Image (tube, rainbow, N blue to C red):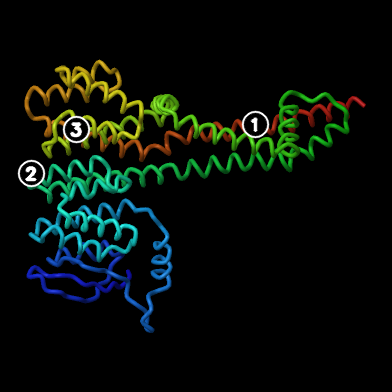
Amino acid sequence: MAVFSYKARDAAGKIITGKLEGKDPSAVADELGGKGFFPISITASTSADGSPPLGVWLNRQSLQFKKTLNPKELIYFSRQLGTLYGAGIPLLNGLSVLAEQTTNPYFQKIISGVVEQIKEGKTLSAALSAYPKIFSDIYINMIESGESSGSLEQVCERLANHLDYEVKIRADIKAATRYPKIVVIAILSAFVLAVTFIIPKFMGIFKSAKMDLPLPSKILMYTSIYFTQYWYYLALGAAGSWIGLKLILRTPKGRLFWDEWKLKVPIFGPLFMKIFMSRFIRTFVSLNQSGIPILTTLDISAKTFGNAFLTQVVQTIKEGVKEGADLWERMRNSKVFPPLVYHMFAIGESSGTMDRILGKISDYYDREVDYSIKNLTTMIEPVLIVSMGAMVLFIALGVFMPMWDMTKLARQR
């Protein structure tokens, strides 16, 4: 636990200062909020000579040149903005407080820019739209709906929860795939090591015996020659393939084909679909609850997939709804949405309880995603074991089959 110095305002607007122990500035801010205080700045306590700790100093210096935003910073900003607004603090004052307390100079400049635009007469959503790399379409539209309906506090909380869940999913997937990644790297490293250093020594012995090599040995021999003598062709081929794939994915048709193919990959395809359905339904519910028109809701929700194929499907559905068709019917005709989803949309449309019904479906898919991610390693393990066994068997056959032949020849002599 580190010690942080803070400056905050109490309910009466009085400035207070002090020190608190916490895991990070966000934890300290949450503790201050629980006491009814509104943080202005939170910094790590300085050392005896008055200078900041080395880690803090290095972090500040790196941030001076870093023009990126950690998703957690946006979550913290959204939650704190809603809290300040709900406490009756004017929007400009609340944003100024958030600008002062952020430790990211890049984000600080953005918030200050938003403040200046609001001073010029722009709305909060219009000011945020000037920074599309930071604030997405869903973020801006929900803020706009919160401004018009007077429910900005609730909207900010929904946005924070939405972003928080996205961060959690990414972290869970990274954690679940860490072990398979290590195993794959180990397998590839072992293969390269074998064909580069071990196989050539055996092949020299076999060549000196002037014997006809079996097929596995020939494959290993030529692979070894390629790796040791023509490695630069391999490097150029890998780099060319990578650049070519990147260029293809920049084209609409290439991206469409790739994103559709990803949904058909064993093990990962069903997981991707669950994640996309959970993201789409949660976004749809949040926008619908905020009073955004259905066509706009579909348009924004389609962009949150992160998948060009599914985005195109939803855009086609939107055009059908614009012509007067039922939303659930268009979903069914797309042959992409699972039956559970379009059936629940049908129930929600007919009963007028769309938000409640879809909220349950969103919770269901959230649980399914969590379950699938937790079991991802278990599902991949058999594939990794078979791959490793196949590689070991192939190398063993390539090395030992000629040795057996040499033993037979020696016995005949």
Looking at the image, residue 35 sits to the left or right of residue 335; the answer is left
- Locate residue 365, reporting x and y percent: 25, 34
Marks 1/3 in contact by CB < 8 Å: the verdict is: no
In which image quadrant can residue 60 be found? bottom left
Q: Amino acid at mark 3?
A: Thr
Q: Nearer the viewer, residue 77 or 122?
A: 122
Residue occupying image coordinates x 71% and y 32%: 223
Mark 1 vs mark 2, CA separation in Å: 67 Å
Q: Residue furthest bottom?
A: 49
**Which label is found at residue 393?**
1
Residue occupying image coordinates x 38% and y 27%: 263
Looking at the figure, which quarter contains the C terminus?
top right
- Locate residue 199, reporting x and y percent: 74, 38
Disc 3: which residue: 297
Say what secondary structure mark 2 lies in.
helix
Give the foreground label among 1 and 2. Answer: 2
Q: Residue furthest front?
A: 120
Whether residue 266 is visible: no
- Locate residue 139, reporting x and y percent: 23, 44
Q: Amino acid at mark 2?
A: Ser
Looking at the figure, which quarter contains the N terminus?
bottom left
- Locate residue 20, reporting x and y percent: 25, 72
Chain-order first, disc 1 or disc 2: 2
Q: Amino acid at mark 1?
A: Leu
Marks 1/2 in contact by CB < 8 Å: the verdict is: no
Q: Nearer the viewer, residue 110 or 150?
A: 110
Disc 2: which residue: 149
> Where 362 sits versus 121, above or below?
above
